[in-house]
Image (spheres, rainbow, N blue to C red):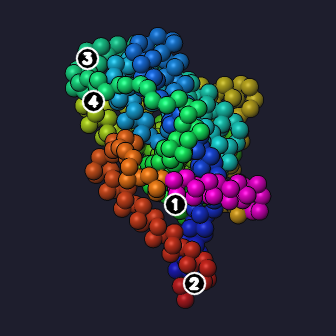
Amino acid sequence: MDQFLEQWAEAAYTSIGFFWMALWAFALGYLISSLIQVLVTRERMQKTMGVSGPKSVALATFFGFISSSCSFAALSTTRALFQKGAGLVPAMAFMLSSTNLVIELGIVIAIFLSWQFVVGEYVGGLLLIGFAWLFIRLTRPKNLIEKVRKRLGHDENDQDGGPSWKEKAGSLKGWQQIGMKYVMEWQMVWKDILIGFTIAGIISAFVPQSFFQTLFIGSGGENAQHPGFLAVLAQVLVGPVAAFFTFIGSMGNIPLAAVLFDNGVSFAGVMAFIFSDLVVLPVLRINAEYYGWKMALYILAILFTCLIATALVMHYAFLFLDILPESGAGKDITDREMFKLNYGFFLNIFFLGVSLLLGWLWARQRAAQDHGGHGGSDTTATVWILRAFSLLSVIWLAGGLIVKAFGIDGG
């Protein structure tokens, strides 16, 4: 009993520490995302992506880069783009870019992992788009696309106009809109973040390294730094399969990915796990509601195939360039001084102040603003499951912190 309570306290403390390390990065990323969403009109984006040529794919990738990193928001926007006439390839490029190439994700990866993973995320995101384009060109799902367009119908509500970005940036109303978007960004992802960081703390405290060596073949042990191709392939396959049954988005997955890497999982296996935010079960269910099960499974096949290919290409490209990061094998992410008085501490304080200001602007205008859009894509079942796990996470963290603070033991 004493050991359990000690591990419980360690798990809760680690989860809170993980979040504290990444807080400023989340706030900075969502602030940038909110600024772009308010100052750049989405209607103008949508009108540029009606074909599947290089220009439309490049523009879709760019617009995804400056968009939100929430998987559910990306699904909703992708459906809107497709419904407004965008080709399947540009729509997929937008979805992959908006979940893998966004600024805040790279910042959080840099905090928890290393620069190689940041490069892997962005270069790999571009490779994902390229492989998806190739997959669609080879399979040519023309009949399936036509059926989906009939299912979705047409959306004629695509008007552009209003104040320029300069007028918005220089007005109180514009900043109230930015505050609304900023709060909505947090509303979209706080459950994923809470659950993801809680699970990461639990795994780091309770799960022994032997478990990872069993689940991810070739991790840990003497050959952990240079696993053979079959071991790397097995880890790449396990990563998305394990992620499929989670409800954690890309941002919540990063601390867990760091735990995997610290326990000897290869670069390719960790990258496959990070890239798997769009192959989780809730995403499959949402796509099925939008497009029907046949198209949902087709999109799943695209994503699963392409992320495996991307993870393998990135792994062996880094190996060839001699920049492959060394997996954990004895390291422990919990050894870091998570609450150290450093630049991160002062950035957290600054962005907490920014968040309070934007939250105040949101509170003043929320009754007059349109709340729709981002969060509506969740199914009812997903919402309730996320709420239940969020409540359990809060109870777990609060209990663990109480145990740690008062030194409670099982005696």
Task: Point out the stretch of residues depicted in magenta.
Answer: 340-361
Per the model, the C-alpha gap separating discs 1 and 4 is 33 Å
CB contact under 8 Å: marks 3 and 2: no
In what quadrant of the picture does the C terminus appear?
Answer: bottom right
CB contact under 8 Å: marks 4 and 3: no
Residue position for label 1: 198
Residue position for label 3: 146
The secondary element bearing badge 3 is classed as helix
Inspect the image, locate mark 1, and give the three-letter code of the amino acid beneath it.
Thr
Upstream in sequence: badge 1 or badge 2: 1
Q: Residue at x 31, y 16 (%)?
A: 141
Residue position for label 4: 291
Inspect the image, locate mark 2, and give the three-letter code of the amino acid beneath it.
Ile
Upstream in sequence: badge 1 or badge 3: 3
Q: Residue at x 69, y 36 (%)?
A: 116
Residue 321 rendering spot, x and y as whole percentages: 74, 25
Inspect the image, locate mark 4, and give the three-letter code of the amino acid beneath it.
Tyr
Relative height, residue 76 to residue 52 (above, below):
below
Relative height, residue 4 to residue 387 (above, below):
below
Depth check, mark 4 against mark 2: the one in front is 4
Per the model, the C-alpha gap separating discs 4 and 2 is 52 Å
Q: Main secondary structure of the magenta part?
A: helix
Residue position for label 2: 408
Residue 401 rendering spot, x and y as whole percentages: 57, 74
